[in-house]
Image (cartoon, helix red, strand yellow):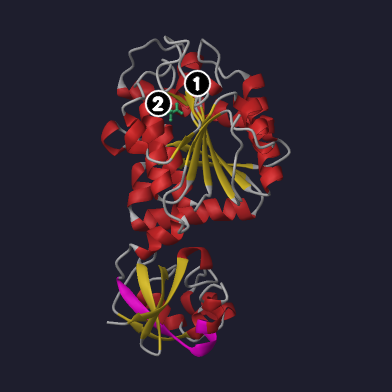
Amino acid sequence: MASSSGNWQRIVIKVGTSSLTDESGRIFPPKMWAIARGAQVLGQRKKAKVVLVSSGAGAAGRERLGLKLPLTLPDKQAAAAVGQTLLMLDWSRALAPLPIAQILLSASDIQDRERYVNAKNALEASLQLGAIPIINENDSVATAEIKVGDNDTLSAWTAYLIGADALIILTDVDGLYDSDPRSNPGAKRIDTVSDITEIEAVAGSAGSSRGTGGMVTKLRAARIATEAGIETLVIGGGGAGLEALAEGDLWGTRFLAKAHTPARKAWLTQQASKGSIAIDAGAFKALKTGRSLLPKGIVEIEKSFDFGDAIAVTFERRLVAQGLSNYGSESLRRIMGKHTGEISKILGYKDYDEVIHRDNLVVLEGKKSS
Ligand code: GLU
């Protein structure tokens, strides 16, 4: 049996429909309780924060409304709306006494910069406050054109969004095999994958009829996550598989991460800056020691930018950092040089103490400012 690795601080666990429901599509609580327990055991053992990506809303809603396949789009949307409440009620019971935070995302929440920062901030705040975020796609208002489409991919995006160290995808089959284990009893499990391209041909597209993903979407998710530096594990056994992982046993396949830059930092360095702010020596020192940027340390603002835009941070005309601004340039011009305590008096509101939160900031030092 392969052993698991990793010093993980943030783990995303993707729970598919078939991991949660019985044959009729109804949520089967004992499966969910086992996963809830496994997730908590793993989080405690790794001293990591856990985020869940849970499917099951569509299936639970269809069952509750007595809908038969095939469904029209509005039927699917209604099923998701009804099923999502059932899903969260059950998760809330399964994870009690911990609070859970329902966050429904759609493709634009990751692709659009402003929405990306909003989604990220909501997730960060939920984690800081001790809640377990549970993500699903916002299926009741999403249509095919604007959908992520499957929760394997959504879980990779979520892992990217919160800068996870590991993505764990729970599945019916305990990992990736060199041929289909359902038809070939001699099929062998692949323990570790370092090059996804080589094994993409091995995976079939078949999954169960209740969820959306087969092995193909799991591989796609593994590709997105590992390229962002996030180790990805596709494991079987539901809650027991998670508990085994906490003990160091891997009931599945591990996809090794490609880059070593944390995902959120990698994403940040790829963003084009809309404007720039110059900071004083005190603020520069604070950034270098991992602190956030506050309005007090800003001495100059260049160009015009909005909330959520990537901006450059300069010190003595050198580019020293890049990050996502919590304030637009107009507001920032009014609060620069001021203490955080004065923000609400000056602007009439205060959404953030920090102009750039340290989680949304990457210190670059040494590069020449253009
Ligand atoms: N978001 C869908 C649901 O909750 C599931 C999508 C998937 O199975 O990948 O029903």
Q: Position of residue 144 (x, y in %)?
A: 28, 31
- Reading the image, the residue beneath label 1 is 173
Q: Provide the secondary structure element on which disc 1 rests.
A: loop
Residue 183 visible from this viewpoint: yes
The reply to whether the magenta stretch includes residue 277 is yes
Res 231 label: none
Residue at left 56%, top 78%? 340
User: Quarter of the image containing the C terminus?
Assistant: bottom left
Residue 257, position in %: x, y? Answer: 45, 47
Please tell me how many numbered marks the rendered image carries: 2
* Residue 326 occupies quadrant: bottom left
Q: Relative to 55, does residue 279 appear above or below in the rendering?
A: below
Residue 205 is drawn in which quadrant? Answer: top left
Residue 42 lies in the magenta-colored region = no
Q: Is residue 62 left or right of residue 133?
A: left
Where residue 187 sits: x, y (%)?
Answer: 45, 16
Q: Give the Cα distance between marks 1 and 2.
A: 9 Å
Magenta stretch in the rendered image: 274-284
Q: Secondary structure at mark 2?
A: helix
